[in-house]
Image (spheres, rainbow, N blue to C red):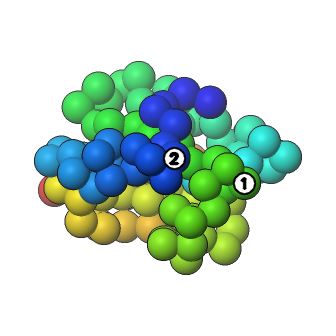
């Protein structure tokens, strides 16, 4: 999984206090759909160096998942300047991921 792993210790500094655009991918090692979605997220991250990509393993940081009421994975959370802009549940095709990011970070 690419992206900066977020934990309870670094979540505030790396995600909430970051001034720019952040996409957080909530996932788990046992999640088949998460593994299938991973190459799409990684390709998108490589195409968008202006967006900070982070990951949250829901088994290792359940408090962060609870904060955003994550009930299903994969889920993407879009933040800008620490403010929640969008939550997207489930895998997305690349075009839809692009559209959601454009809308969230406009």
Name the residue beneath numbered marker 1: 59
Residue at 21 percent across and 51 percent down: it is 17
Residue at 36 percent across and 25 percent down: it is 47
What is the x, y in percent for residue 82? Answer: 24, 59
Left or right: 35 in relation to 50: right
Q: Is residue 78 above or below residue 29?
A: below
Residue at 57 percent across and 59 percent down: it is 75
| Rendered image: mark on residue 7 | 2
- Residue 40 visible within the image: yes
In the picture, the quarter occupied by the C terminus is bottom left
Crowdedness near tag 1: few (<14), some (14–19) or many (≥20) residues, C-alpha within 10 Å: few
Give the secondary structure at mark 1.
loop
What is the x, y in percent for residue 42? Answer: 52, 29
Q: Which of 97 and 45 lies nearest the eye of the viewer?
A: 45
Crowdedness near tag 2: few (<14), some (14–19) or many (≥20) residues, C-alpha within 10 Å: some
Residue 35 position by quadrant: top right
Q: Sequence-wise, which precedes: disc 2 or disc 1? A: 2
In the picture, the quarter occupied by the N terminus is top right
What is the x, y in percent for residue 79? Answer: 30, 57
């Amino acid at each position: 999984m690419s992206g900066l792993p977020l934990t309870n210790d670094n979540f505030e500094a790396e995600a909430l206090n970051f001034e720019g655009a952040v996409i957080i991918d909530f996932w788990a090692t046992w999640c088949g759909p998460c593994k299938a979605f991973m190459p799409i997220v990684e390709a998108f991250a490589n195409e968008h160096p202006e967006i900070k990509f982070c990951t949250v393993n829901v088994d290792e940081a359940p408090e962060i998942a609870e904060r955003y009421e994550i009930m299903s994975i994969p889920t993407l959370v879009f933040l800008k300047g620490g403010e929640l802009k969008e939550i997207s549940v489930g895998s997305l095709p690349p075009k839809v991921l692009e559209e959601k990011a454009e809308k969230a970070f406009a």
